[in-house]
Image (cartoon, grey):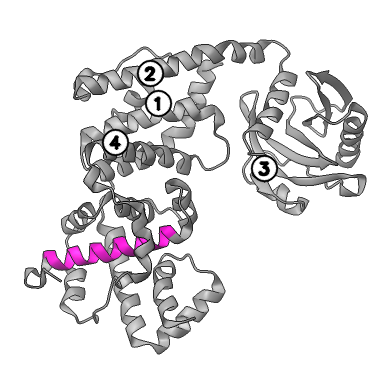
Amino acid sequence: MLESKRARFESSVSPHLAAAYNLARWLTRNDHDAEDVVQEAMLRAFTFFDGFRGPDARSWVLKIVRNTCFTWLHVNRPRDVVATDIDQLSDALPSACSGSMDDPETVALRKAEAYQVDEAIAAISATFREVIILREIEGLSYKEIANVIDAPIGTVMSRLARARSEIRRALARANDPGRGTR
Amino acid sequence: MTPENARRLLGAYVDGELDAASMMELEAQIRESPALQREFECLSVLQNLVQSRGRRFNAPSHLASRVFAALPEAQPARTSKAVPGWWRRLAIGTIMAAVALLFWSIVPTLDRLGRGAGPREEVLAAHVRSLMADHLTDLTSAERHTVKPWLSSRLDFAPPVEDLASEGFALVGGRLDYLGGRPVAALVYRYRQHIINVFVWPSSNNQQVSVQTWALRGYNIARFDSRGMSFWAVSDLNPEDLQKLASLLQANTQ
């Protein structure tokens, strides 16, 4: 009985370990910590596995990994986590893209190198980074992201908008130091 | 759609998350507003950039074996050098001990399910669990043409779904469950104030087995086989009405 639970757990979780590691690596920004967090998350997941049913094992796994990451961040990198009442400010968010396509910022955007993209993503706070990773790198839908971060879809949308706006500004700064303070 | 709303929906638009009506409305606005047009193009460039150049970190090859080796009951095969800090090792050790302890307390239960009264106990446990966990249905619909394809697309068999509202058994919805080591369909019916779980899975024989009923700890269970499927109905409903449901289901699936 126990062996079959282990076997079921492994076959449910294995396909999603890559996504779990990628998310943990982006949130902890460190190889070793990412591994430790994934391992701890999988121990938690195994404990709760009896209560899991439903078709979406990926969201379930990512949710546990994400929660384990944020517990870890609160202890180890408290400044990386933004108080969630920031969402209420979202209505006043600046547009992610306000200039014209000939604007130097947009031109710079088109020329951005892969490492600059990674640096820009890494530079934003974990609260916004996680929705970008889930959406753009892992390809989750808004509904799946809402499920993983346990927030309404409106929050997913405003965090994505905020994340994109910050990534764009970071890229513009990286490529055009003269306009860096904008 | 106000310009402000249109601007706010651009993100959902590039993410392909808008419904058709809002999409058409937004596209009309983008055609008319150069500012919106620029913003849309810029968002697309940005999205493209992150999707194509953003990094997906590859998990180290030893991760899966490390993670699964650390599960309770497996012999610990973890390498200590991968775990920096004694306190972290202590924390993981504590968690493992807690998990192991939890396991010891449920192992006898699992064993009893495994050998004792067999499917009846398991079916009853699943029924009680579905009521306790506030997770009665994955899909709530009284429409069998909705429930059946939903279940069929998630299982390796197509469970028969019948609407018996005219007989007083209203279809509430469907759920995926896990019994006897395999995924099964759970159909949920309501009869007056009683919830009935009907578990369906492919049976090993193709014979018809007529309705049998049991009483177990205040619950009633009815079971029959039809067209290569095993049906198990369980509820706190009285045995006569539960048997009636089972007979109706059997008559409808024959």
Q: Amino acid at mark 1?
A: Leu
Q: What residue sits right under mark 2 in the picture?
A: B96
Q: Are marks 2 and 3 on the same chain?
A: yes
Magenta range is A155-174
Q: Chain of mark 3?
A: B
Q: Could one spot residue A101 in this view of the protein?
A: yes
Which residue is at the far bottom? Answer: B32
Quarter of image, res A107: bottom left
Question: Would you name the residue on which mark 1 appears?
Answer: A43
Q: Residues within 10 Å of mark 1 (few under 14, many from 20)?
A: many
> Which residue is under mark 4?
A72
Q: Quadrant location of the N terminus of chain A?
A: top right
- Relative vertical location of residue A161 with respect to residue A102 in this rendering, above or below: above
**Mark 4 belongs to which amino acid?**
Trp
Between the C-alphas of marks 4 and 1, the distance is 15 Å
Q: Kindly report the distance in space between the C-alpha atoms of the residues bearing marks 1 and 2.
A: 8 Å
Instruction: Specify the label residue B150 is tagged with.
Output: none
Q: Is residue B175 left or right of residue A172?
A: right
Q: Classify the position of the C terminus of chain A by image quarter.
A: bottom left
Foreground residue among A59 and B88: B88
Q: Position of residue B205 (x, y in %)?
A: 78, 25
Q: Examine the residues drawn in magenta and state their main secondary structure.
A: helix
Q: Are marks 4 and 1 in contact (CB under 8 Å)?
A: no
